[in-house]
Image: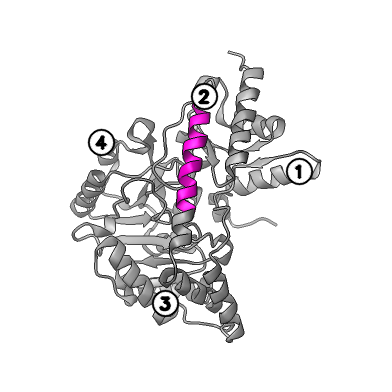
Amino acid sequence: MKTASRINELQLEGAFSVLQKARALEAQGKHIIHLEIGEPDFDTPAHVIEAGKAALDAGWTHYGPTLGYEDFRQTIAAHVAETRGVSVSSSEVCVVPGGKPMIFFPILAIVEAGDEVILPNPSFPTYASAVRFAGATPVSIPLIEANDFSFDMQRLRDSITPRTKLLILNSPANPTGGIIPAEDIREIALLAHKHDFYVFSDEIYSRMYFEDAPRSILSEPGMKERTILLDGFSKTYAMTGWRLGYGVMPAWMIDAMQKLLVNGISCTASMVQRAGLAALTGDQSPVDRMMAEFRERRTLFISMLNDIPGVRCRMPNGAFYAFPNITATGYSSEVLATRLLNEAGVASLEGTAFGEYGEGYLRFSYANSRENLAEAARRIHQWILANPATR
């Protein structure tokens, strides 16, 4: 017996694989500092938890509408309209259990065999998985460290062909923390019109930035009919386990999404949607406090990484990831990540977990305490000094 060949097009997430290895080492009595998992280490805000509890008590435990409750969709539409500066109606919104259905289902809805999908590299591995699963060809555009991990725009222009159906953006980005400059967003919008392709914009880290707010391509003139926007609650409100996300897209595509959602998930949990409604409409100070703490951690951890021989790390502009260049250590990404886990007790991800252009980098999530981040940097520093690579 064997699975269908299409299953071979899917890949696992490195973060969960490393977490499993780290847990096994902990079971042997080793102390591991976890910098591999991309989730905030903060609790879901208290008022959101209370709203979820109240919803359970009030009987929000049954099937709901496939696309989400209307009042929740209206609130999401108003939030997107306010933050992106473009009119959005509830008929252009769908609610999903976490962000991944909003990656897979739109790609399945518009991409066909023979199409090409341009995507950043390194990037979230589910993008390329979904494209290949749909029978299309992923076209990787390397992110440039000197550009704060944004595109080489000339490489992007040269990669567009008559078969280009979709371009995937992620800003702020996983794994780099990079933000696409506003002028590049404007040019990408012009390219989409000129060459007649759609844009999938993963904005799950939309409120996790440290300087200027990232520019959404949805805000560009004429892009509402060409953009599929993903956002959600996992990162901003530390609600990863609640599984709650949403998409904004042209109304014509909502029909296709409804078919996929009906067949794939039925609906998003009713009580979770009530909690999400409270998150958007309630006190936002927990988000502000979380981002203030991430700012302090970023400064501390990046400065300590840059003191390590053979390591250099740009200051990330968003999300909560550090993506240091480790080529000067003499180690490959996979070897260094593995040995740091097994020998130094620091769990990270090799850059190649996010694509071939991630070679020469590691990804650290600084969603951990300042004390643990400082200790992790010290362990890495000491290990590299004690283990020079053979050249």
Q: Residues within 10 Å of mark 1 (few under 14, many from 20)?
A: few
Residue range in magenta is 290-306
| Badge 4 or badge 2: first in the primary sequence | 4
Q: Which residue is mark 4?
A: 154
Q: Is residue 302 magenta?
A: yes
- Pointer 3 residue: 72
For the point 56% across and 66% down, the residue is 242
Q: How many marks?
A: 4
Element assignment for label 3: helix
Q: Which mark is residue 307?
A: 2
Q: Is residue 246 above or below residue 60?
A: above
Furthest residue to the right? 28
Q: How far is disc 1 from disc 2 in space, using C-alphas?
A: 28 Å
**Disc 3 marks which amino acid?**
Phe
Where is residue 296? Give x, y as percent. Answer: 48, 42
Q: Amino acid at mark 1?
A: Glu
For the C terminus, the quadrant is: top right
Q: Nearer the viewer, residue 183 or 54?
A: 54
Asked which secondary structure carries label 2, the reply is loop
